[in-house]
Image (cartoon, rainbow, N blue to C red):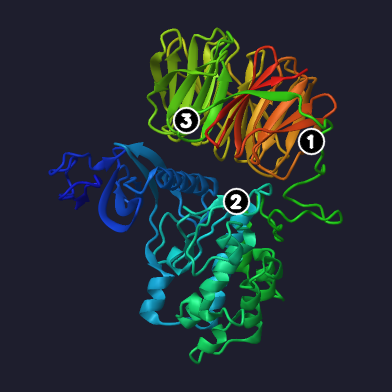
Amino acid sequence: MSYCLNPHCPNPQNSDDSNFCLTCGAKLLLRERYRAIRPIGHGGFGKTFLAVDEDKPSRPPAVIKQFFPQTQGTSNVEKAAELFHREAVRLDELGKHPQIPELLAHFEQEGNLYLVQEYIDGSNLAEEIARKGTFNETQIRQVLDDLLPVLHFMHYHQVIHRDIKPANIIRRHSTTNQSFLNPKTVGQLVLVDFGAAKVFNETQIPGTGTIIGSPEYIAPEQARGQAGFTSDIYSLGVTCLYLLTQISPFDLFDIHEDRWVWRDYLKGNSLSPQLGRILDKMVASQPNKRYPTALAVIDDLHPQTLPPAIRQSLAYAEPVSTTTPASPPPVKPQPSQPSTQFPQPQRVSPSKKTSSWRCLYTLTGHRNAVTAVAFSPDGENLVSASQDQTIEVWWRKTGKRWYTLTGHTNWVTTLAFSPNGEMLASGSRDNTVEIWDMTKGKRWFTLIGHTDGVEKVAMSPDGNLLASASRDHTIKLWDLIKAKQHFSLSGHTDRVYTVAFHPTGKWLVSGSRDQTIRFWDIQTGKELGRLSGHTDWVRDIAISPDGNILATASRDGMIKVWQLQNLQWGLKRTLRADEVDIFTITFSPNSQILVSGNQKGQVDVWQVETGMLLETIAAHSQDVLSVAFSENGQQLLTGSYDRTVKLWETRS
């Protein structure tokens, strides 16, 4: 059976060998590989379908989530679209944890947005309790043992789920995609539906958040738009109360006495005083009276010895495997026990009290996050790339949009100009690199060879070679004169997020999710060496224009500055502005200033020689994903997850 995904199709049922709907003519295959079988859920803004992946011989099952706005009003549609995109971003960032569905694809087709993710073969806990009745203490402890490490993992990565409830917890029935490093066990609980998830932001103004989640299970502060890490702990606790009683949580709380009365509904189930105290603390109305972290709950559940299975599951949350997992942010490390998450040095404060930069223009028009920005070499234009699959070209003098480049079929993630400005390269999550003729404003040719999304492209100083870094763990070198692959560089053991040529053009540098920085000879394609020291993904790298300094930025909140001495890179210093993900860094043309963009929407300006944080610019309302200096160093371009591009000019 094949099911038509056209939401207006009157007869969506088709045979399993059809490629087009016999009723409305719509394509039945998404991205030429995913075939919907039957609907399994729906809401006001879309549907969920069971599907198969026909690109693989085994035709494994998958889940398709389709977003299609109807008539709910512009603001509601925009908010729903934002949540839909957010779910894809969060699933992607959380990686391949065995108890979180893996994101397989995210794209737009025929006017609708789609998210494809791993299919979890099982039933949710709401279905399970309806079929089998209430849980006993042993079962509740198993729920907590299974899910608290998942909460720890999410919170470590600064993600709050915000919609934990029985219907969003699935018990796996079968083992799929099992591997030694990523076991997926029968009976294991899986947390699904990250559409309501958000990234924790310490600068969020109380009272300005959005109320999201299921009313019966959300914490009181979340109902006021102020969700935090403990809000997830509260929702998990309330879920346990429902599983013990099969009574609506609304009826388990006495509003007149302002207390939980869940013990009155235990229906003969005996519960140990220890577990009762733990649940009471998890569902305390005031956040400061709850457990501060998921690890604290685990410690109370197992005061003596941590079971091996839980210890193993906690290892997924760490950048490197440890026997004692660190607490998730925003808990500050104690001086007597240096944190493995955010090593020394300690946070520094800007030296300047007033900003040296003023915003000239805010460029709007992208429908989704701005992932890359660049100045054209002649200084006439600004260019921006977005998750909306477009590249916008703007007039620098006026801040007005000139024209749009289209052709990618998934997020555009990166941009790079040739030195003469006649050629622009763009990389995308559609696995391709497009080469654009900027003298004509149209696509020239496409480079195909990566098997997963392209995260970064870089031009060689002479403009003859292009390097592309990919999620498929490789870097490819392309001969732009012949429009074909020159080398494929293999060695990284995880996604390669960034790549840059040395100004001499003789070698290049790459940074990866495997936490290493590697050096490559572009003549032979051989690895020359590597650097380590970051404790999380290497997000971006930058080489100073004079070729003497290498800067590496990581999700561990650190920027490491390396100096070239006697053909060897030595660590000069480590910079830390805050405990947040650093997405992007770049040097000024004179090599004296380093600029970084982070998860808080801030741009930090560093003095390279001294390592001094000169100032912090409150540039955007969300993640700063890309920064670029103008040719004279007097202007700065920033792109953000808030969908805007901003042009800044120094006052000095």
Lower sequence index among marks 1 and 2: 2
Look at label 2 and name its amino acid.
Thr
Residue indicated by mark 3: 366
Q: In this view, does 580 lie to the left or right of 420?
A: right
Point 49% across, 36% down: residue: 472
Q: Which amino acid does label 3 sit on?
A: His
Q: For marks 1 and 3, give the one nearer the viewer.
A: 3
The residue at which mark 1 appears reads as 574
Residue 27 image position (x, y, % from top left):
22, 39
Q: Which residue is drawn at 56% across and 86% down?
A: 263
**Residue drawn 30% across and 50% down?**
52
In the rendered image, is residue 648 in sight?
yes
Q: Which of marks 1 and 3 is nearer the N terminus?
A: 3
Helix, strand or loop under label 1: strand
Residue at label 2?
208
Q: Where is residue 526 in the image (x, y as percent from the top left)?
A: 59, 24
Q: How crowded is mark 2: few (under 14 residues within 10 Å), some or many (20 or more)?
A: few
- Which label lies toward us, 2 or 3? 2
Report how far apart the C-alphas of labels 1 and 3 lie in the structure.
35 Å
Q: In this view, does 489 lie above or below 169?
A: above
- The amino acid beneath tag 1 is Thr
10 Å crowding of disc 3: few (<14), some (14-19), many (20+): many
Q: Where does the C terminus fall, quadrant-wise?
A: top right
Residue 488 seen anywhere in this rendered image of the structure:
no
Q: Nearer the viewer, residue 27 or 61?
A: 27
Mark 2 secondary-structure assignment: loop
Left or right relative to 199: residue 70: left
